Amino acid sequence: MTNFSKVKQKQLCPICFRIGVLVLLFCSTSSVFAQDITVSGKVIDVQTKESIPGTNVFVKGTTIGTITNIDGAYKLEASSEAILVFSFIGYESQEIPLKGKRILNVSLEVDSEQLDEVVAIGYGTVKKRDLTGAVSSVQGKALANIPVSSVAQALTGRLAGVQITTADGSPDAEMIIRVRGGGSVTGDNSPLYIVDGFPVSSMSDVSSNDIETIDVLKDASSTAIYGSQGANGVVIITTKSAKAGKTQVSYNGFFQTKKLRNRLDVLDPHEYVMRNYELAALGGEDDLKNFENKFGVFDDLDLYKFQKGTNWQDDMFGADVLSQQHNISITGGNEKTKFSLSTSYNHDGGLMKDNDYTRYYLNLKVNHKLADNLKFNANVRVSDGRTNGSGTSGGSYKVRTSDAVTKGPVNGLQEFIQINPGTLTDDEYAEWIKSNLTLSERAAQYWKRKYNKKYSFTGALTWEIIKGLTYRLDGGYTIGFKETQNYWGQYTSNASYVGGKPLVDWTKSTAKNYREVQTLAYNFNINTLHNFNIMLGQELVSGQGDESNIYATGYSTDLTPDKIFANLGLGEGIPKVASAVYDNDNLESFFGRIGYNYNEKYLLTVTARADGSSKFPSKNHWGIFPAAAFAWRITQEPFMESTENWLSNLKLRVSYGEVGNNRIKSTMYKQNYSIQDSKAYGIGDKFSGYYGAKNKQLANPNLKWETTVTRNIGLDFGFFNEKLSGTLEAYNNSSKDLLIERSIVAPGYETTVENVGAISNKGIELSLNATIINKKDFTLSTNFNIGFNKSNVDKLADGISEQVYSSGWAGTDNKGNDDYRVRVGEPVGLIYGWVTDGYYTTDDFVSYDESSEQYVLKDGVAGTGLLGGVIGVRPGTIKLKDLDNSGTVDREDRKVIGNTNPDFTGGFSMNAMYHGFDASVMFSFVYGNDIYNANKIASTQKYRTNDANLLAIMDAENSYSYLNRETGEVVTDLQTLKTMNEGNNKKELWSPYSFGNAVVLPHSWAVEDGSFLRLQNITLGYTLPEAISQRVSCSRFRVYCTVNNLWTWTNYTGYDPEVSSPVRSSSTSGLTPGVDYSSYPKSLSWTFGVNVTF
């Protein structure tokens, strides 16, 4: 009998030995595999088989990683047992264990959910395909390759229904943004700006380098979640987020040179003195003697033909200016903690000498996972800006652009003589110095500096209680400091009022804002067909502010402005100090949103918000703002299956909602007083000279919310797998209960504010996007947008159909200073004045009366007493239409002569990439708006300013003249005047002496078509091949050149058609748009820069 146990034992021994050897071999092999190895490979699209450059490749659980190059290739050091994570936007991420592999090629599949663009909609996000409201978006990558100094500048012409206008070309100019025309008459029409979930006062608070996405909410179904803050639209800016993986350092920087794009033609020195001689001769013997003392007698005026003279536009704006911007960003982290740090330095040199704008930005974002279901986010944002120089636009304390046109090109006889020491008295020498100051020297006499610092600290705690149920707590604190320092030198008119010594004014203000938001969101579905998204929220906002002002005089001319502001006590007088603490601006809110989605075919969104604002009296403290939107994705219907080969998307959207507007002063419903700036109060029957307060405006305890109702219908469409896509929108917005100031009859009061107005905006918007070519080495895409908007004032106060407003550009000189109208049945922005009818010809007169030195008009020819002056109405005088046929042109002959609202606005762009080269071009356009060219009025009248120069169109060849240039005598004979001015070479324009001293009349000749097509920018860039860029230890190196404002096609005769000067009062500038007076001109710029990623 065989002993099977022994046999078995003998057989097992060698087997066990062999197994042991294999185990040892495996362990030793495993130890080898656990060592670091070099892994390389390529990442491609699983369908197209084309490479995917920029794919993130990193070791799971670490910060070790890299990105694929332009060919989709990668290489990195990793443990042989590591797990590599491959991720790219629009594709499903993959996690692949190495298992010792040294070559690992990966194919990524398109993620339909990720590829669908995510849009911010207020306290949340939604996939664009599931959007029910009207939202326009711009991705950061569309802006990344365009070097701009501000976010708003980058958006110009990119969004349908969003009009962006630069008030002027000064370095710190704010952009005027209007979404679908705005919804208020006298209130603020600016949209609400949200950066990373928190409101900010301006888009300039964030650097353009930090932008991830910008979403503009345009209808109430989108904005109602912001309640009283969303009446004029909402601009949501999301900054770049922290990302896990290898730490990346990026540098983006450029240098820019810019210059004045065009100059206005003015009279040359000889024509200048001849025109001034003619004015003096018309004025009489005394005026002529004064002229000869300054410029010489008539026979000597030919000397000025050889004088080059000074073009003061060159003195003020002539030098090329250097600007620069530098940004460094660092991102990195692991799956638990991620961070992003960005810092920027912007220096924007102004065209005007000694005028510039410098700003620093810091943006820090940290995301930390406290637990699998608990996350904490923190964000610190800092901006620090400084503006040097007085600027030019509007205001009476600045050197104006118009001075560069009207200042004489020569100083008369002073051009030919030398002033020796002791020749003049001190006063005479001071006047001589003052008269010889260049505009740049005068600008230095009006010294100004502004500081603007803002610090924002925000944080959020997100807790996923159970799957789909998320609680979020947000908190934030923002504090801002503003300072404005004004200095007036000894040669300014301000100094002349206080003994001729320099004086200063210093204003400081502080604004604080606290915000707390709680939201509870629940996402769930039933049978996978019924998808719900429910969100409830509560918000508290509190704003505080204060301001102080110091005014001091009597400083030595030896002291610089910096020394004076360092020690205000150096002046002769005692500084006057005033301070104010503003009422708190508090807002308490409760809001909610319900989203329903049936099988991604039918979508419904319902929102509501209740706001309680301290800006309104207790009985009207609360406002409730509901909205609803429905969308139908038609292409999901079975009956559309036959179109799936060419129609990839067709969605119909409708919405209705209400939003409020609390963008008003917090004290509007309270009784306000103003401090008298002159002593006007006494005791008893004697005037004692005390300062006091007076009633400013009668309080109205019944003020309530302005409310805007929006109605929107939209169609989203896409063809050939979204190669051609777009959106068509139509809207009808109406605002009621608008707060309007109106005159009242009450002892001690002149005005009060009431909820009496109504305004509406109707329009159509179209956006198109096309991918023309999409190949590995060549892509070409384009987009186009256009928006039509018609605004209408539906109601003013009871019994009132019209209100008048003044642009104020000419001060008290303007006899027609109520040059704007707000009328029921018409849009805001109507220019009001006289209709220009050429000029009086010799055929309009009977004769010249030698005794009275006046011309006698024929019967039936209307005269006017509006023009004034020493020459009266004569041949060559500007003629204004007598609209009421009264026989005299007066204030009753005015009418609406212009409409500053465009018929449509928009833009189009094209982008291309070819073998490392990239190119883009951007156009913007505006059509149908009028511009009130006040510069043209001011620089074509000789009586406006003593010894003023004029535009070249007012020379003797183009405009009427009374001077016999052979003899130097004034011609009065009708026939001779006719031969001189009305013959074969008939003069086009009237005499520059048509108006009397300090007389300005707005008339239709100065209202011009403001339509334009602008080549906004053109960019050409090149990204170096990886083999070259790696030699300088970077993964991406791009160089580029950009030209901004290269060309503008327009019939407008001013510096630039994109203008709206806030001339006098910012509170009424919204009612008097489109004025061009002394605006800071825009520049033509060349930019050279690099984008580097390490």
Image (cartoon, rainbow, N blue to C red):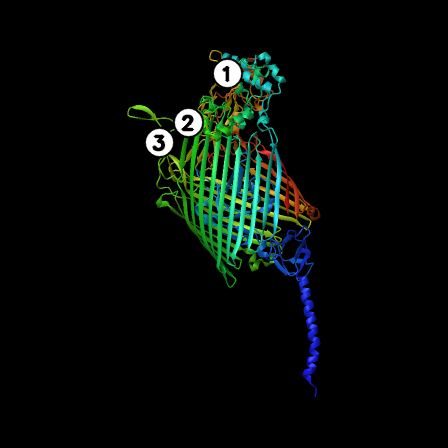
Alpha-carbon distance for marks 1 and 2? Answer: 27 Å
For residue 1049, which numbered disc appears in the image?
none
Residue 989 at what x, y percent from top left? 55, 23
Q: Secondary structure at mark 1?
A: helix
Residue 832 at what x, y percent from top left? 47, 31
Q: What amino acid is labelled 3 in the image? A: Lys
Alpha-carbon distance for marks 2 and 3? Answer: 26 Å
The answer to whether residue 641 is seen in the rendering is yes
Q: Which residue position is annotated with label 1?
A: 426
Q: Is residue 389 above or below residue 527?
A: above
Q: What amino acid is labelled 1 in the image? A: Asp
Q: Secondary structure at mark 3?
A: strand
Front residue (pair 970, 561):
561
Q: What amino acid is labelled 2 in the image? A: Ile
Q: Which residue position is annotated with label 2?
A: 574
Give the mark nearest the N terminus, 2 or 3.
2
Front residue (pair 325, 668):
325
Q: Nearer the viewer, mark 1 or mark 3?
A: 1
Q: Which residue position is annotated with label 3?
A: 694
How busy is the neighbourhood of tag 2: few (under 14 within 10 Å), some, or many (20 plus)? few
